[in-house]
Each structure stands twice: as structure tokens, then as C-alpha cells.
Amino acid sequence: MLGSRYVRGGSVAGDWGWHRKALSAWANFYVNAILRLRVKDATAGFKAWRAEALRTIDVSSIQSNGYAFQVEMNYRTVKHGMRIVEVPIRFQERAEGVSKMSLAVQVESALVPWKLLFGKKLR
């Protein structure tokens, strides 16, 4: 199950600027265009898993870091023929801490979908 900001009833924090909304929309479009995940919130990190699903996708062998980790988990799920159910969530901005969205994380996030598609090693 995936907590989705972009299904009916879901939403993002009201204080997101246009650039953050655009980046999120672009990332979801980009990932879905390449990997055909057919989910509205491919980069979401709020998930609930069945133990059997984690065993099937071999979570211990996930190679991605950062935000790309979410994409790789979704990709493996879909590739194994399992269904991802999206449920609405209201995404709130963090109350403490800072974003980990560094340039390196952005580059990895852009490359991982292609590596997954073509079966390349991720590191």
C-alpha cells in the first residue's frame, strides 16, 4: 500500500512553493514515463508492505539510496506482478530537520529509472 499525495483525497502541504510542486510533478511523470509503474505518486515514501511482498522483491538487495530507493521498490513490485494500491494522504512539511535533496541525490534519482529499465548495476 502506498500513501499517495496525488489520488483523490490526497494533498501536499499548503506551504509548498510552485518549484517544489513542479519538481514533484516532473519526477512522477519522468519515472512513470520510463518505468510504466502506473501509480500517481511514484516517489512517495509512505508505504505499508506485506512480509511476503518484501521477500519477493528481495528488499535486502535494493541498491538505490535516497529518493531513488522508493522508485526501485515500486519497480520491483510491479515487475513481480504485484499490485500497488494507493490510498490518499495529506503530506505535511517536516517540522524539524532539513531536506536531503542534494545534487548527488537528484542525479541518482534521474539515472536510476534508466538503470532499472535496462537492467544495469546501480552502483
Image (tube, rainbow, N blue to C red):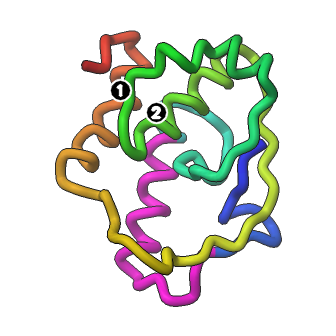
Relative depth, front residue between 86 and 64: 64
Task: State how far apart marks 1 and 2 are (Cα).
Answer: 7 Å
Q: Residue furthest front?
A: 96
- Circle 1 sits on which residue? 114
Q: Residue furthest left?
A: 103
Q: Residue at x 75, y 21 (%)?
A: 53
Q: Earlier in the sequence, mark 1 or mark 2?
A: 2
Q: Quadrant of the C terminus?
A: top left
- Circle 2 sits on which residue? 34
Q: Sort mark 1 into few (<14), some (14-19) or many (20+) by Cα contacts within 10 Å.
A: some
Q: Sort mark 2 into few (<14), some (14-19) or many (20+) by Cα contacts within 10 Å.
A: few
Q: Which mark, residue 106?
A: none
Relative depth, front residue between 55 and 71: 55
Where residue 79 appears, as percent x and y from the top left, is 64, 17
Which quadrant of the view contains residue 49?
Answer: top right
Q: Which residues are magenta?
A: 12-31
| Image: 7 above or below 62 | below
Q: Secondary structure at mark 1?
A: helix
Residue type beneath disc 1 = Trp
Q: Residue at x 34, y 21 (%)?
A: 115
Residue type beneath disc 2 = Ile
Q: Quadrant of the N terminus?
A: top right
Q: Secondary structure at mark 2?
A: helix
For the image, the number of numbered tags is 2
Q: Is residue 85 magenta?
A: no
Where residue 21 appears, as percent x and y from the top left, is 46, 73
Q: Residue at x 59, y 13 (%)?
A: 58
The reply, left or right, for residue 105 in relation to residue 6 is left
Relative depth, front residue between 57 and 35: 57
Are circles 1 and 2 on residues that touch, CB within 8 Å? yes
User: Chief secondary structure of the magenta span?
Assistant: helix
Where residue 60 appears, as percent x and y from the top left, is 52, 16
